[in-house]
Amino acid sequence: MDSEIQYRKELNYLYSLQKHGIKFGLSKTSNLLEGMDNPLYGQNFIHIAGTNGKGSVASFLSSILQECGYSVGLYTSPHLASFTERIKVNSSEIPQERLVSLIRELRSIVVTEEPPTFFEAVTALALRYFAQENPDIVILEVGMGGRLDATNLVAPVLSIITNISLEHQEFLGDSLLEIAEEKAGVIKPETPLITGVKQEAIQEMFNRKCQENNSGIHLLGRDFDFRQQPEGLEYQGTNIRMDSIHPGLSGEHQSQNAALAVAASEVLNSKGFNIDVPSIRSGLQSAAWPGRMQIVKNDPYVVLDGAHNPEALLALTNTLQKDFSYGKLYLVLGIMEDKDIEGLLEIILPISDYVIYSSPDYFRALTPGELESRSQAWNKEGATANSIPAALDMAEQKADSGDMILVTGSLFTVGEALTYFFPVEFAPDNT
């Protein structure tokens, strides 16, 4: 059978598991890993939870560690165009033929009567791949929450919680503190925690849990800090002080993500890793994370950002207003139906001149018509487009030199935009 056909067949099996929805718990993932020779043993893990910035911190850290000569595994979600983006070693995506082999191994141990969820299955095969490749360190991004997330079977050398805001209340809890309690599940015995949370009550709760686990805690604003200066980012930590840093990821909010990565580097040094300041600087500068404040054209500007909750979208709009000068803003918007729709609209619509309501090809996406209907209160000029490519065609026809086209609302929306602009580099799986 042709290798491409094999790849699509096995990937279709994985996607078929999405019908089982989201189910919290560790037992099924644990059973899968047991059937795959317990791939957790002998690995060094960094575990990253939080509402926003997980992928960016992971990207910064991966880049820094590679600059220091370490081999680095990276597990993130979701992907933008191709499934293989989720699992990387030294920035190289898992080869399709390896993925086919791993999925077949997974299928051989799945109990048909009790199938895993999509994320449980993907996490298990990712951990199996890392065990086979044996990188020096593996960076794992939490899927949702922390305590009962499929990734939370690891015993990391370092845990990171980026920040906390309201998200996934139907799964994680109605209040910030309840959500933070779930994310605090990544705090492990005698494993230091680095966090950028600013809410005092959450800091106190994290402090208490770290004391219970005999784990040190490194708080942004107390143990390390950063400032944005005209000449670049400035960092002050326990043993490292740096200035004139120019992170490769754009946006004011990326300064905090970069600072978390530098703080992580300090802690890793104390655990026997050898991470020097020149490598930190070059690693931050060379970091790349597509679909996050990504400028794909300059005149008119075309900016892609996967912000999908109010906190992330507010950071995006602040960056646009501070760092860019443009005429009209043409907004291409596609949002998942389970997000805080009104919260997103009230942030982005007021700064937009023309809105193209659209929808990525994903089962959870809000329809263009429904999105337009829920935007009526803002009385914005606009239109609907049944696909992201059609929306981008419309935006490029309307925008003049000096204007901006902003594509946002979901990583799925941004993923299809990346395929539109870079059809080879971001070719979709087409399963």
Image: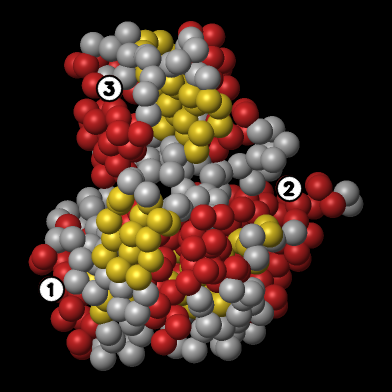
Residue 37: image quadrant is bottom right
Q: Do the residues labelled 1 and 3 touch (CB within 8 Å)?
A: no
The three-letter code of the residue at mark 1 reads Glu
Circle 2 residues within 10 Å: few <14, some 14–19, many ≥20: some
Q: Name the residue under label 2.
A: 8
Question: As displayed, is residue 264 above or below residue 291?
Answer: below
Between tags 2 and 3, which lies in front?
A: 3
* Residue plotted at (56% across, 77% down): 137
Q: Name the residue under label 1.
A: 204
* Rendering colour mode: secondary structure
Label number found at residue 179: none
Is residue 40 in view from this perspective?
A: no
Looking at the picture, how far across and down is residue 157, in whole percent? 44, 83
Is residue 353 in view from this perspective?
A: yes
Q: Mark 3 points at which residue?
A: 351
Q: Tell me which numbered mark, 1 or 3, is placed earlier along the sequence.
A: 1
The three-letter code of the residue at mark 3 reads Ile
Give the Cα separation between the discs numbered 1 and 3. Answer: 37 Å
Residue 75: image quadrant is bottom right
Q: Which of 51 and 103 is in front in this view?
A: 51
Looking at the picture, how far across and down is residue 310, in whole percent? 26, 40
The three-letter code of the residue at mark 2 reads Arg
